[in-house]
Image: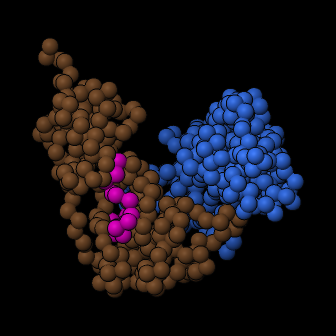
Chain colours: A blue, B brown
């Protein structure tokens, strides 16, 4: 009987399912991460663990790591993992973690910072976090209407990169004023990023999926940047545009 | 009674719902497009229309265009539009169109062509089509395992750009051999696209979401291109990578 998978209490399942919703994440100050890669990354990050549920297979495969971290865990079935999380298929693990305090970081003059002005789609936010991590951007600041960092879809689409960035939610205009750094914004009809010869570190602002950068934040933009179009598409998805701008800015900053 | 919305026959609804599946799209040689923007764009394209269903609001707003095109249409309710398509909300229109013949195009030496080697996710394919349209890439060739161009999610995520590209499905290796053009492929550990000073027009190959470019196609790649990483993310989504490569190649081709 010792090898039997433990029965998860109904309350545990109910609690974790409540974390699918922002209201309950806020109430409990917790969120969850699922899938092998993301759980492994979050266990090695500075997020504090609340509880961990793993399959026998995951436990067997990562036993050395799990022993070293001296983590208490529950071995559960694939079906139980899938009943708690949002993945259609999860035969690995699910971790419940404490959210971090929403604390502003300082900005320095020698780094590129990303600011999101009401990026609402969780998939876009997660993809942008992955792009930031690719380009070595460690600091992100989000307007209060931007999607919730702890939304399971954000966590999933960031592919583990959510563990490697610092972020906070704030009134963007106040933050931009306080920092006093150069502010770049993605606009139609600005300077072509293919013609720019140099660019100083600063804050790159990306706007809402439908409306772009708000007029309030637009007033704080020192330099309007445009991705040159060669065809007829009217626009690019905000994550795509973020990637292209980061690529160009990083190329110019690292000649 | 004249103002009443017409009753759609059960057979019509059943027929259109069958087009959600590739098997029935192939059997009928038809696909559907929904939503205001995409329907307007497809009506002005060279796709042949089979039937058109519109809301009163759409009909009122686009009456001049619809009259000029002398299209026979049925006015239906929002609920009926939503019952036929896959949008959660569609108070505009749904068009049924004939698929195009799968016909190879010729390649010339002065243009950039995109080749997809088993890009499986419909959202990625649609986003890549939108990116191609932004960068003025008019020709795309797909391996036979690439997602179906006529999948409703591809149509949706291309945001109308599906009307402005030519494409065919084929054995990629045969096509690349026949064309004899330079072939570029996205790989880890290739030439950094930030260091390349010039690049000739040719075929850019993008690979599968999990496995990248297959070894068979990899052998035909003349130049391996890499997006330089500045951080720790292990990879980029294939649509993101396509955008960054197209941006760099177009910049080099249009100095």
| Residue A200 position in % (x across, y down) | 71, 62
Q: Can you tell which quarter of the image residue A168 is in? A: top right
Judged left or right of residue A153, residue B92 is: left
Q: Nearer the viewer, residue B94 or B148?
A: B148
Q: Which residue is drawn at 43% across and 81% down?
A: B216
By secondary structure, the bulk of the magenta-drawn segment is best described as loop
| Residue B109 position in % (x across, y down) | 33, 81
Q: Which residue is drawn at 20% across and 31% down?
A: B10
Q: Quadrant of the N terminus of chain B?
A: top left
| Residue B239 position in % (x across, y down) | 49, 60
Q: Can you tell which quarter of the image residue B165 is in? A: bottom left
Based on the picture, tell me whether residue B137 belongs to the magenta stretch: yes
| Residue A136 position in % (x across, y down) | 71, 62
Q: Residue at x 29, y 35 (%)?
A: B84
**Which range of residues does the magenta coloring cover?**
B135-152
Judged left or right of residue A230, residue A28 is: right
Q: Which residue is drawn at 61% across and 79% down?
A: B189
Judged left or right of residue B48, residue B132 is: right
Judged left or right of residue A124, residue B76 is: left
Q: Can you tell which quarter of the image residue A120 is in? A: top right
Q: Is any part of residue B186 visible from this angle?
A: yes
Outermost residue to the top:
B1
Q: Is any part of residue B247 visible from this angle?
A: no
> On screen, A178 above or below B120?
above
Based on the picture, tell me whether residue A38 belongs to the magenta stretch: no
* Tally of numbered discs: 0
């Amino acid at each position: 009987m010792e090898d039997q998978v433990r029965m998860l209490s109904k309350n545990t399942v109910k609690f974790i399912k409540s974390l699918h919703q922002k209201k309950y994440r806020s109430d409990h100050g917790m969120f969850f991460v699922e899938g092998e890669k993301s759980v492994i990354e979050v266990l090695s990050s500075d997020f504090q663990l609340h509880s961990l549920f793993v399959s026998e297979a995951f436990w067997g495969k990562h036993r050395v790591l799990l022993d070293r971290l001296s983590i208490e865990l529950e071995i559960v079935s694939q079906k139980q993992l899938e009943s708690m999380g949002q993945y259609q298929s999860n035969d690995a693990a699910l971790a419940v973690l404490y959210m971090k305090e929403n604390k502003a970081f300082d900005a320095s003059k020698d780094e590129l910072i990303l600011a999101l002005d009401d990026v609402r789609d969780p998939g876009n936010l997660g993809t942008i976090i992955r792009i930031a991590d690719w380009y070595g951007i460690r600091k992100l600041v989000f307007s209060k209407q931007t999607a919730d960092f702890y939304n399971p879809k954000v966590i999933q689409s960031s592919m583990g990169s959510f563990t490697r960035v610092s972020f906070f939610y704030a009134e963007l205009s106040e933050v931009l004023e306080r920092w006093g750094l150069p502010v770049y914004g993605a606009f139609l009809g600005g300077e072509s990023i293919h013609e720019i010869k140099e660019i100083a570190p600063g804050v790159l602002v990306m706007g809402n999926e439908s409306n772009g950068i708000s007029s309030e934040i637009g007033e704080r933009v020192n330099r309007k940047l445009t991705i040159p179009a060669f065809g007829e598409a009217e626009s690019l998805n905000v994550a795509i545009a973020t990637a292209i701008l980061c690529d160009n800015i990083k190329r110019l900053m690292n000649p």
